[in-house]
Image (cartoon, grey):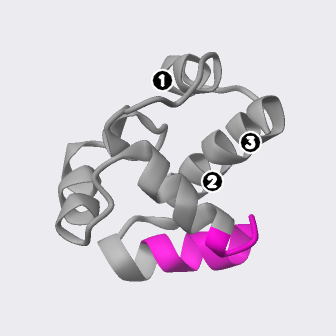
Amino acid sequence: MSTSVKHREFVGEPMGDKEVTCIAGIGPTYGTKLTDAGFDKAYVLFGQYLLLKKDEDLFIEWLKETAGVTANHAKTAFNCLNEWADQFM
């Protein structure tokens, strides 16, 4: 699977206090919508990923419903968080 620079940068180091827009698939528009919904930091969105038990379908649907994220961008975000979890958990 080919990944973006943004993806590689995110999964290449601890999450820390990064903004939600640091996650691959989440740009400024989706970032604003997620921030408005209370998901301003990457770790907060990661928490939702964990609450949904790392389930790809549930997470993608949740992103689509919560922030209007397209299926493609939601899958990119899922893959980014999933790979981060594999490396750091």
Specify the quadrant that holds the C terminus: top right
- Specify which label sits upstream in the sequence, 3 or 2: 2
Q: Residues within 10 Å of mark 2 (few under 14, many from 20)?
A: many
- Does residue 11 appear left or right of residue 1 in this picture? left
- Specify which label sits upstream in the sequence, 2 or 1: 1
Q: Residues within 10 Å of mark 1 (few under 14, many from 20)?
A: some
Q: Secondary structure at mark 1?
A: helix
Q: Amino acid at mark 1?
A: Lys
Q: Residue at x 58, y 70 (%)?
A: 60
Which residue is tagged 1? 6
Q: Position of residue 11 (x, y in %)?
A: 63, 26
Can the viewer see residue 6? Answer: yes
Numbered circle sitting on residue 45: none
Q: Amino acid at mark 3?
A: Ala
Q: Is residue 71 above or below residue 4?
A: below
- Specify which label sits upstream in the sequence, 1 or 3: 1
Q: Residue at x 55, y 49 (%)?
A: 77
Can the viewer see residue 72? Answer: no
Q: Residues within 10 Å of mark 3 (few under 14, many from 20)?
A: some
Q: Secondary structure at mark 2?
A: helix
Q: Tell me the magenta residue range.
A: 51-63
Which residue is tagged 2? 78
Give the camera-side residue of 62 and 75. 62
